[in-house]
Image: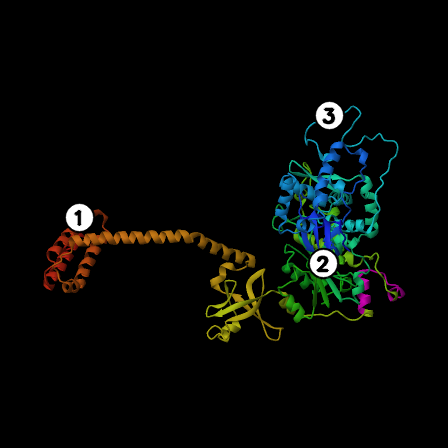
Amino acid sequence: MIYENMTFQYTDKEKRERIRVIYIDNDQRFLYYVNIDAATSMPKKELVDKLESEINNNILISIKDPFVKNLKEEELSELQKEKRDLDWIIIQKYWSTEKEALLEKNGRENKLKDIADENNLSLNKTKKILSRFWQRGMKKNALLPDYSNSGGKGKSKKLKEDSKIGRPRKTNYIGETEQGISVTEDIKKIFEVSINKFYRKKEKISLAETYNLILREFFSDRFFIEGQEEYKVWDKSRIPTYQQFYYWFRNSTDVKKDIFFREGSKEYELKHRPLLKNSTIETNGPGTRFQIDATPGDIYLVSTFNRNRIIGKPVLYAIIDVFSRLVTGIYVGLEGPSWTGAMMALDNMIENKVQFCKKYGINITEEQWTSNHLPEIIIADRGEFEGYSVENLINNLNIKIENTPPFRGDLKGIVERSFRTTNEKIKHKTPGAIQKEYRQRGDRDYRLDATLTLEEFTEIYIKMVLYHNHKIISKYEMEKEMIVDELTPTPINLWNWGINNKKGRLRVVDRDIMRLNILPKGKASVSRAGFKFKGLYYSSQKAIEEQWFLKPKYRWIEIVYDPRDMNQIYILHEDGRNFETCYILEKSIQYRDCLLEEIIFQKELEKELIEWESTKQAQLSIDLDKEIEDRVKKAKKEKEKTVIETTSKSKRIQGIKENRQIEKEIRRLEEAFDISKEEKKEGIVKEIIKSTENNEEHNDVRHKSLMDKIRRKRDESLGKK
């Protein structure tokens, strides 16, 4: 319910307006209010329903009247009383009789001018008297001048010997305590609004800072000195204490909401959510869920070909069965974290582990590492398992993929814990391991200690996995049947027990089929030049025999490829089991044994070089056109000087054949390789040209004799008889 003379404050961060209701028309359901912080403020009209809605939505909250003071008449100075009483005369004279005219905006300015003229006041003085009356509680003492705010900012004060300004001295031994005020529902509302406004923000300010902001916003006087807004906190008898605020916060705050707004929902889910279940609860045997993840190894490696070359940190991939904690697949390489690295780990997941370990000189039995199966569900990161060939895993191999949200590594807690254990072991046992994140000046660079190659580190990692698979799991929630069977909770024991006693979730698949389903897909165009993919050309024996390139049925064909080896691509048959291998053609042989990234880089580089030269090529073309035009102009001028206009057009055309023959003979004579007789040859050419010009009008007989003369002169120049 809204009453006259109530004070409210908007919680909007920018507005922060404090208002006072000065009149309510209950019949018409509207009211008038003024801004209590402005220098002068005229009444504004608003619907009662709108303000009630803002109050219900915490946009507007009720606050303690900032101008309520217990002033004793005898403590006021005569000047204060005099000024107050003079202004009070104006209020008594016009507020009750001219209320409607002063409240309504239309005509208010004229009424204020009339009041100013009648009382020999300025318009601004008249507005200031009425504003102060409305703003400060509509009582006589509201008109008292603000001498308490007087004083020169930045100027030195004249102090008495026994006076002190600023912070009180810490010599008070009386033990005076803060009084505070009663924490009413209005005060609690202020606390609640302030927590949302100040505390539940990403800036993460403290409770003490929040309390100070509450005092500034809701329990202080605002005034301006030299254009700057200043705040003066009320006396301690009019404000809540920090202890009161803290007590309310401790008993009333929503911890979940605080973390959500201050830290973010991801941080809450990762570090603060209740832990009421574990990963094993979501499984009912081996193969129900596998978790896959990747992490950089905390070690620097050297090149296999030259141990003096440091190649950086490896990427570790691991796939772990949630039920048993058994590591079912690994990959150690330089790929990733990416689909290519995950693809290698998935390939190892179904590989025979005895044969896999044998590649690295490790001999194990089938019982030591028995997994080579497909799971029902794979839990993976969104970045690596979105797109690519995930659809094949889902549609062709019936594996469900569950992608974790960003920054939720806790949802793959088992494999994450495995990586932490691995990296801790690496730090203490291997040279080149990262000892600390940041080195101090003068510390030895641990990267220079790198010793192991990728193959050697893989061997170590395999042995660590074998150790993990036979290590007792602490804090594993054993089932009653496991205890009855006297089962020791090691991953290999849990795996074997689960296969024998739980539902069968494990499946096997041919490795080639698995590889075809995890390799990336693409589309190759079909033409007489072959299959074109990524700018490379391929062909296959079957395509040639069946004349695919002579009469192509399709313009495009689906293929799968290995981005690490583009020497061949594969066309899947309709049965999903067989495939046709396509080999790279001679026209693309320069890209043999190249990675896809290298090929793309070379193609992009070629395109950039062409684009780089395009401007230069355009300039060369423009220059060539100009030179041609200049040469033609010059030739036209020469023609104008030499062409005989009396010669008919038909004769000029008829003489083309003979003219060509003469020109050819002259060219032959000029171009003959006889360096010692160049000067003599040049004279003969000039004589022939002169003779030709003189006989230009003669008939064919003359032309024939001229040709004989040319040949004779040529033979003489060459020393022939």
Count of labels in the image = 3
Q: Is residue 62 left or right of residue 513?
A: right
Q: Quadrant of the C terminus?
A: bottom left
Mark 1, residue position: 680
**Is label 1 in contact with label 3 (beta carbons under 8 Å)?**
no
**How busy is the neighbourhood of tag 2: few (under 14 within 10 Å), some, or many (20 plus)?**
few
The answer to which of marks 3 and 2 sits earlier in the sequence is 2
Q: Is residue 389 above or below residue 19?
A: below
The answer to which of marks 1 and 3 sits earlier in the sequence is 3
Which of the two marks, 2 or 1, is nearer to us in this view?
2
What's the distance in space between the residues labelled 2 and 1, CA to CA? 123 Å
Q: Nearer the viewer, residue 318 or 7?
A: 7
> What amino acid is at disc 2?
Arg
Q: Quadrant of residue 658?
A: bottom left
Q: Position of residue 692 (x, y in %)?
A: 13, 56
Mark 2, residue position: 29
Q: Main secondary structure of the magenta part?
A: helix
What's the distance in space between the residues labelled 1 and 3, CA to CA? 120 Å
Q: Quadrant of the N terminus?
A: bottom right
Q: Give the structural element (helix, strand or loop) at label 3.
A: loop
The residue at 77%/71% (across/down) is 504
Q: Is residue 305 left or right of residue 13?
A: left
- Residues drawn in magenta: 481-499
Mark 3, residue position: 158
The residue at 19%/60% (across/down) is 660
The answer to which of marks 2 and 1 sits earlier in the sequence is 2
Q: Give the structural element (helix, strand or loop) at label 1.
A: helix
Q: Is residue 112 left or right of residue 647?
A: right
